[in-house]
Amino acid sequence: MDRLTAMTVFVEVAERGSLTAAAEALGMSRAMVSRHLAALETWLGARVLHRTTRRIGLTPAGEIALERCRRMLAVGEEMQAALGDADGAPHGRVRVACSTSFGVSHMATAVADFVRRHPGTAVDVVLADRAANLAEERIDIAIRIARALEPGLIARRITTCRSAVCASPDYLAAHGTPRQPQDLAGHNCLTHHYVGKGAWTFDRDGRSVSVVVEGTISANDATLLAQSAKAGAGIAFLPTYLVAPMLRSGELVALLPGYRPEEMGIHAVYLSRRQMPRVVRAFIDFLAERFGDVPEWDRGWGEEVNDS
């Protein structure tokens, strides 16, 4: 039995509370997860999990084993990092959390390029439209998109997140085109649960302008809002990393020229600068280099829209 793999399986099951969820995260079958757990319990000589039809819980022995397994896996990761430092190349696995919309639109190709550039590395991506708990979820890097980060977080800004207020040509033909932010009060505005839920803010000549908005559709994922806007449901305030292709193609139209939506930063958040594994440091450097101050999706039309 590969004991390190068995310990990894056990930790995943304990943290996710499900054999199925652990199997999906690890890319193996549920039956294989069960076999690794059984082998681990045989090796330890104790049952580590209570299994019922509704839930999985830790036994007293499992609580002790979980702490020890986490510690041993961390030692293994540190060893991989040390080996990477020795030959000057990153090695090992980096676990990254980011929003679904940014993950699908840009992180997917970024991680593919990273592992191609650095053989011996692997990237585990967790997509969720919430702030991940780095310590509890064993996240090395969380990609946070925010105007300002909470005090105490350690982070590096990797690029800028600009936004566009936009709608489909069909919606504008049926309902008219807003010329100033106050006009939005008479339109169906599609809102994000966590960004601009009740008000959208713009900058015009150094002056902040906010307008209260409401509408029939709200969601915790920008991709759904973009597709709803493209279908003619209303006006949306969306990140350009997501809607740039639709704006270029004419499926969506950028509105309110001269009013610049508030910009946010895209940050790589991590737990500590001390003893950072080379693979984590290399991935953050890679993202900063890849996206740059003016990311690819904003070049050309994006610069014009945001400077109008």
Image (spheres, rainbow, N blue to C red):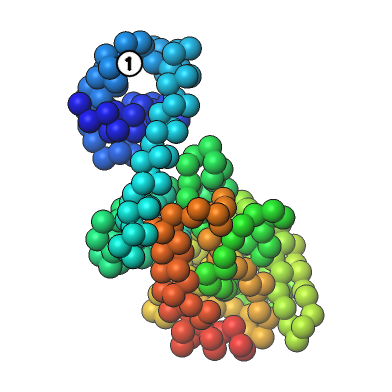
Q: Is residue 294 above or below residue 67?
A: below
Judge the density around disc 1: few (<14), some (14-19), many (≥20) Cα neighbours within 10 Å. few
Which residue is located at x 40 percent, y 33 percent? 72
Q: Name the residue tied to disc 1.
A: 44
Is 111 or 231 nearer to us in this picture? 111
The part of the image, by quadrant, that contains residue 6 is top left
Residue 203 in view = yes
Is 40 or 239 nearer to us in this picture? 40
Which residue is located at x 41 percent, y 69 percent? 286
Q: Is residue 190 above or below residue 63?
A: below
Q: Quadrant of the image for the C terminus?
A: bottom right
Q: Residue furthest right?
A: 207
Which residue is located at x 53 percent, y 37 percent? 136
In the rendered structure, the answer to whether residue 215 lies left or right of residue 294 reads: right
Where is residue 92? Give x, y as percent.
33, 51
Q: Quadrant of the image for the N terminus?
A: top left
Residue 55 in view = no
In the rendered structure, the answer to whether residue 247 lies left or right of residue 33 reads: right
Which residue is located at x 29 percent, y 20 percent? 40
The part of the image, by quadrant, that contains residue 119 is bottom left
- Helix, strand or loop at label 1? It is helix
Q: Residue furthest front?
A: 86
Q: Given the image, on which type of amino acid does mark 1 rest?
A: Leu
Where is residue 162? Give x, y as percent.
57, 73
